[in-house]
Amino acid sequence: MNRLLSGLFWISLCLILAFITLPLLVVVAASLSPSSTVTFSPADWTMKWYAALWASKWLDPFILSAKIAVIVSLVSGVLGALGAYAIAYEKCPGSEAIMAFLLSPLAVPQIVKGVAIVIFLSSAGLYALLGTPGLIAAHIVLTLPFAARMIATSIYNFDKNLDRAAQILGASKWQRIRHVLLPLIKPGVFSGMTFAFIISFNNIPLSVFLVRPGQTTLPITVINYMEYSLDPVLAAVNVASLIFILATIFLFEKLGGFSAQIHGGSK
Amino acid sequence: MTIVATDSPAAPARRAFTLRGYVPLFPPFAVLLLFFAVPIGMMIGISVQDPKTSQFSMASYQRFLTDGLIIAGLFRTILMSGLVAICVTVMAYPVAYFLARSTSRWRAVVFALAIAPELAGVVLRTYGWLIILEDRGFVNDALIWLGFVSSPLPLAKNLFGVVVGLTHVVLPFGILALLTSIQGIDPNIEKAAQILGASRLSVIRHILLPLSIPGIVSSLLISFTMAASAYATPALLGGARFKVLATMIFEQIMFYINWPMAAVMAIVLLVLMLAITFAGGRVETRLHKKLNI
């Protein structure tokens, strides 16, 4: 009986892991297959779908998405740090209510935020903001709570005695923020910014309302294309953007060194 | 305890707290007010306007409650999200248990496999499921080749396809929710029961499952809310016939240009989310009290 149960456990674990990885493997194989029939034999594989990506049809949306994601991650990082600073460092009165307000967008489904923003921009006569500016604003609203929460956590975890030591030694407030607080919470700020970048780059439910012709992000371009064709070029687009995201995470990690924090090893 | 004295330099700073402390909050608050709070308020305002004359009217709410197609969409949303919540929790449990208890070097591999798909985004995974499940896809090709079926099974563009796709999208969150809960259970309780002669099955039934109920509840909750508000997966894997609230909202905005109706649907979705999160939160706190965690 016990044998049977543990056998069942291992089999179900393997099946579930297979379920998780299957679509990813299929997409990678599809991006390398010569025709729309997916093949898993490396001998037949070709890079022609990746070569097809070098056209403005795919490059323009990619550049737009990357541009938006960079701006969104920078702005969310700065705004999130300001909010987290007031709440977690200054501990201003009412900080719990303030944090609740900063996190409130999380309680609202993205599609609802999308409807609200598109109604707002259209009925407030801000049509001009539809497209890139609207996308940036909407993505900031979406990612700011994550950034604020991550940065607030790292400020809470930061050793206040170091700050006191600097104060006793005569450091001004600005000096303490600049030379004590910021270097120590840098991993938190960078993980918040990385999060914002990924969420913005992959976003669909908000972007779908705000794109306009000529200003369409990559995921929206892909789903519009998917409506009528499942061309392997889509597989190549998806794999290429996944590689781009992994490269960005790697870059952010090099700059901010947040992996220690994610593994729970913050000192 | 002379160390206490060193606390004093920080004390004046705290006493001297002034309104200046609120200044850094201004930029994030301004952004959230302008692009979140005001738009949500406007959406609620528009929901009580007549679609044509912009006069005050509850017509869209009335239509929501009486239009059979919309009610069907609401029930489809609830059915789909309920199924996803159950599938995710059932599938996440063994993975979370393994991650909570294993000390082998495979743990890191399994953790990476469980979480990594989240980086890939919804489009890639939905595309993957489409080429697996569509009529001329992978599974159907294999089934026909093996002779199990003569014509392709309808695996995509229906409830089945959407539930598979969403389960895949939400699974990592279910795993994390259950992992936190199972990690909080003392493994010695399981060992003690085993030493006292309990079979593996009764350890699961009488110890593991009851103690991990808070984790199960939070996994069900997060899966339900994520599934109910998902847009891309139902839109792509559900096809034209399988409409849920999220895709119907999009149609109202983009095709029918009926803002009041879209606003009403969005408000219903929002209220559904908040109600479930609130009810689930109540259940969770009660369970935590009962289990003394």
Image (cartoon, helix red, strand yellow):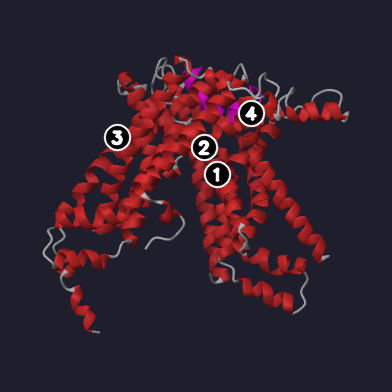
Q: Residues within 10 Å of mark 2 (few under 14, many from 20)?
A: many
Q: Secondary structure at mark 4?
A: helix
Of the residues tagged 3 and 4, which is closer to the observer?
4
Disc 1: which residue? B116
The residue nearer to you, when weighing A153 against B41, is: A153
Q: Please state which of the two labelled residues, at mark 1 or mark 2, is closer to the viewer.
A: 1
Specify the amino acid type for callout 4.
Leu
Q: Which residue, given by chain and number where applicable, does mark 3 sit on?
A: B34
| Residue type pointed to by label 2 | Leu
Q: CA distance from mark 4 to mark 2?
A: 20 Å
Q: Are marks 3 and 2 on the same chain?
A: yes
Q: Residue beneath label 2, please? A: B269
Q: Position of residue B89 (x, y in %)?
A: 64, 51
Badge 4 or badge 2: first in the primary sequence: 4
What secondary structure is found at the residue carrying circle 2? helix
Q: Quadrant of residue B39?
A: top left
Disc 1 versus disc 4: nearer the observer? 1
The residue closer to the viewer here, A107 or A220, is A220
Amino acid type of the residue tagged 1 in the rendering: Ala
Q: Are marks 1 and 3 on the same chain?
A: yes
Front in this rendered view, residue A173 or B211: A173
Q: CA distance from mark 3 to mark 2?
A: 22 Å
Which residues lie in the magenta part?
A: B233-257
| Position above or below: B50 against B90 | above
Alpha-carbon distance for marks 1 and 3? 34 Å
